[in-house]
Image (tube, helix red, strand yellow):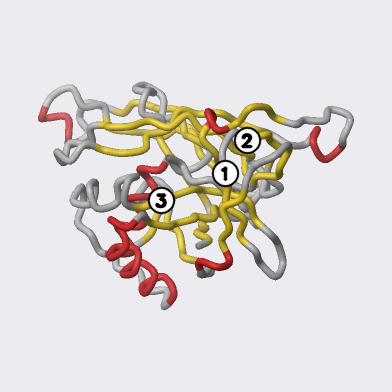
Amino acid sequence: MDVGGKLAHFRKYYANNTAMSFSIPPRTTVMGMLASILGRERDSYYEELASERIRISVRVMSPIKKTFHRLNFLSIKSKSDFDGSGGRIQTPFEVVSGYDISKDMVVYRLYVSCSEQGKDTFEELKEKVLQKKVHFALTLGTANFTASLMSVRLFDANEIQEIEANGIVMIHSAVPSDAVERLDFDRESEEDSLQMIEEELLPADFIKNHDRELKKMNRVLFSTSMAGMKVELNRNYYKLLGIEETQHILFLE
């Protein structure tokens, strides 16, 4: 499914005085988006959408950039400061956007599958997204960065083939870093010279205690363009056969 909006912000958990953003939504953020579609209450879905039940990956579908802006927040040092008497404080805030903010959108492709344990949840999700029925509003990170469900495609089991990864392959989704033996990057190629590949340590799962305590992290490699990246893998990947494009993906697990 493709999800898009004008702006995005996926706050880095380790940045406490500056609101820095990941370039792609972490798995935990995608869990929240799926929970919004399903109509699950806040913090109630950690076990239902955990990695061992629901399989998730992400692809960047539009050229993106990140810029810093300064936001005015109330300076709160005591209970009486909530009326604004404590003054204001400016906080740097990183925003993900398209290259031309007046015309471009931020679009991510979310790949979702399931294990046998998550089959019931997946069937419910499938029914809702194919009809484009969203229970709660979708957002790209923060509540004010609204998003919409743009397009959905269902790949039947015979369209998804798990095949051996021999040599270099073009991977379109984000992949676990430990699945990559090497990157094939040609500095002489004009296409490769314009490509940006990032590696991040992203939150993956929460402990079922409603406190958003992390249970698992994923170190992830991804391209910031929809073209994908050429890699040599040490595990099988999925081949999604489409009319316009054949996509190669791995799930973040």
Left of 73 or right of it: where is 93?
right
The residue that label 3 is drawn on is: 55
Q: Amino acid at mark 3?
A: Arg
Q: Residue at x 72, y 67 (%)?
A: 244
Q: Classify mark 2: residues with Cα within 10 Å, few (<14), some (14-19) or many (20+).
A: many
Residue 116 in view, yes or no = yes
- The front one of 7 and 148 is 148
* SS class, disc 2: strand
The answer to which image quadrant residue 221 occupies is: top right
* SS class, disc 1: loop
- The front one of 2 and 16 is 2
The residue that label 2 is drawn on is: 233
The residue that label 1 is drawn on is: 236
Position in image of residue 246 (x %, y %)? 68, 59
Position in image of residue 205 (x %, y %)? 31, 39
Q: From mark 2 to mark 3, how far is it between C-alphas?
A: 19 Å
Q: Amino acid at mark 2?
A: Leu
Q: Residue at x 69, y 40 (%)?
A: 166
- Contact between labelled residues 2 and 1, with CB atoms less than 8 Å apart: yes
- Contact between labelled residues 3 and 1, with CB atoms less than 8 Å apart: no
Point out the tag, 2 or 3, that comes first from the N-terminus: 3
